[in-house]
Amino acid sequence: RALLSPPAGALRALRGLAAGPEMHFGFQSVTEEERRERIYQVFESVAKKYDVMNDSMTLGIHRVWKDILMHKMNPSPGTLLLDVAGGTGDIAFRFINYVRSVRERQLQRKLKHHQNLSWQEIFESYQKDKFNSLGDSQVVVCDINREMLKVGKQKAQHLGYSEGLSWVLGNAEELPFDDDKFDVYTIAFGIRNVTRIDLALQEAYRVLKPGGRFLCLEFSHVSNPLLSRLYDLYSFQVIPVLGEVIAGDWKSYQYLVESIRRFPPQEELKAMIEDAGFFKVDYENLNFGIVAIHSGFKL
Amino acid sequence: GSAHGRHCHRQQEQGSGSASGSGSGSARPQPPEPSLLRFLVCPLSKRPLRYEEATNELINEELGIAYPIIDGIPNMVPEAARMTHKKAPGQGSEQP
């Protein structure tokens, strides 16, 4: 990996006296404070091109991953979802679509069984508002980055999402939500960028209702050696170039690729989730471990 | 954007009612989603907040801090908060 020899010695010398423990920013060694700052800047920089880049880098497959996450969640109408690091709204919109279609099927089944409705009743049943098309489902999108939220909100407006959706600027490590509030907590491609993952997991546990579910979709580790080599080649040779060509930002995508390599593998993340108090913790590999969905319950 | 010109008898020079993305100084502050207020607490103390319409902020009386709502999005991070004994933004004194 001659391409990326990090200037470890020089950096450490400069920061040797700096406050706080040393952490990683991709392959660089930085203080906690710097790491937060840099990550904030990465996402501030990529926000407007975030979706385009996701499509280019993953050849659109990230959409499938997110769909799978939603199917795994299988939310019923009335579910309260907290989507953390949900910036541009991908998970939130899918959630709304999902509960809306479940709700529609519920209503259709109900109507089919009431064969002897009066015309008045049939008329009323077509007034969607009366039947609450989302069935009281709600999703709160929480992200620490204002630019990402801005893009998400604009997207929502553009695509016509308004009901049951709200946006909050907050820190995954210090959530501004009360205890035992949410049915489901999701964090999709976000936990990798959290500086104190243990705190974020503890907060996730805190805000979930008893019986609530934690779901994490994140890049993970490929164990197959051949695939791993190909994946590395693609990651380090292609992605930063795409980043430069599409978003004019090589460095941010270099960070992205490095942060994936630095992130704990499946079993280690599972252990961390268990440490936060979750039960029945499990994970599912997608595409041989390029991505994994971790799940846990607050019991 | 779509044309809202169906019954456009009034002449509106500044934008036809679409969302005020390019905020000038006199942009109307957007209040938060009412449903959101059910869930929100102070991230530091996890205690309830009071919505102050006058300044469009969420106030933690106990700690004396106020979180701003910017473009309809509550900024629930301590870095964004101000101490309530200081003047609110737009009420005279300059804030750093």
Image (tube, coloured by chain):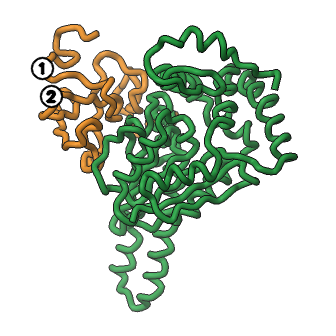
| Relative image position of residue A51 (x, y in whole percent) | 62, 37
Q: Chain of mark 2?
A: B
Badge 2 marks a residue whose secondary structure is loop
Q: Residue at x 39, y 41 (%)?
A: A167
Q: CA distance from mark 1 to mark 2?
A: 7 Å
Classify A299 as above or below A139.
Answer: below
Q: A256 left or right of A97?
A: right
Badge 1 marks a residue whose secondary structure is loop
Q: B32 left or right of A279?
A: left
Foreground pick, B7 / A251:
A251
Q: Disc 1 marks which amino acid? A: His
Would you name the residue on which mark 2 appears?
B64
The numbered mark at residue B85 is 1
Q: Kindly tell me whether residue B3 is visible in this rendering.
A: no
For the residues bearing labels 1 and 2, Cβ distance under 8 angstroms: yes
Tell which chain the image draws in orange: B
Q: Residue at x 58, y 50 (%)?
A: A217
Q: Residue at x 76, y 54 (%)?
A: A288
Q: Residues within 10 Å of mark 2 (few under 14, many from 20)?
A: few
Name the quadrant of the C terminus of chain B.
top left
Classify A268 as above or below A132.
Answer: above
Q: Disc 2 marks which amino acid? A: Gly
